[in-house]
């Protein structure tokens, strides 16, 4: 690894397989409604999934979380449904900090997203 490689890596580990992300990436926007991921995805396009502050997908329905889903915190992270970037909920002057990135092609992530969708929207 050269010195230049220090700008990219895995900075934040989710419960799912992770891939490297650059150290100083931001999602644009000022709130969850107008957030635009580094990859260009937005809430009106492929959308984002809510996660707890460990990066685990959350059960956003009322009551205790079910299955492998986490309890929804007051200040959830967003995970881009397109590229898997984990996005901090606190907006800064530069936008929302990208904390890490889930491997969206991993079986673990695909299964978790299925459970998230079924629990939160299909039942
Ligand atoms: Zn994205």
Image: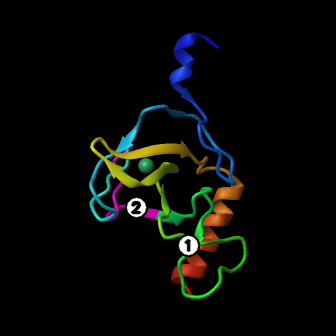
Q: Which residue is drawn at 50% across and 66% down?
A: 50
Q: Residue 46 carries which label?
A: 2
As rendered, which of 104 and 100 lies closer to the eye?
A: 100
Q: Which residue is drawn at 49% across and 64% down?
A: 76
**Category of crowding for the residue at label 1, using alpha-carbon neighbours closer than 10 angstroms: few (below 14), some (14–19), many (at least 20):** many
How far across and down, in percent of the image, does residue 58 sit? 58, 70
Is ligand 1 within 8 Å of the beta carbon of the residue shown at mark 1? no
**Category of crowding for the residue at label 2, using alpha-carbon neighbours closer than 10 angstroms: few (below 14), some (14–19), many (at least 20):** few
- Quadrant of the image occupied by residue 117: bottom right
Q: Residue at x 33, y 57 (%)?
A: 42
Range of residues picked out in magenta: 39-48
Seen in the picture, residue 18 relative to 29 is either above or below; the reply is: above
Q: Which residue lies furthest to the top in this view?
A: 2
Quarter of the image for the N terminus: give it.
top right
Decide whether residue 79 is among the magenta residues: no
How far across and down, in percent of the image, does residue 43 sit? 34, 63
Left or right: 87, with 6 as reference point:
left
As rendered, which of 11 and 74 lies closer to the eye?
A: 74
How far across and down, in percent of the image, does residue 47 sit? 40, 63
Q: Is mark 2 on a helix, strand or loop?
A: loop
How far across and down, in percent of the image, does residue 25 sit? 41, 37
């Amino acid at each position: 690894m050269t010195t230049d490689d220090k700008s990219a890596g895995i900075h934040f580990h989710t419960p799912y397989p992770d891939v490297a992300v650059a150290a100083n990436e931001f999602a644009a926007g000022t709130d969850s409604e107008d957030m635009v991921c580094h990859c260009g995805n937005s809430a009106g396009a492929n959308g984002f999934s809510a996660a707890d502050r460990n990066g685990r997908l959350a059960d956003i329905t009322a009551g205790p979380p079910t299955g492998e889903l986490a309890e929804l915190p007051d200040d959830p992270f967003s995970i881009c449904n397109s590229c898997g970037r984990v996005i901090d909920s606190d907006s800064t002057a530069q936008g929302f900090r990208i904390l890490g990135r889930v491997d969206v092609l991993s079986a673990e992530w695909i299964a978790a997203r299925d459970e998230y969708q079924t629990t939160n929207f299909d039942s």
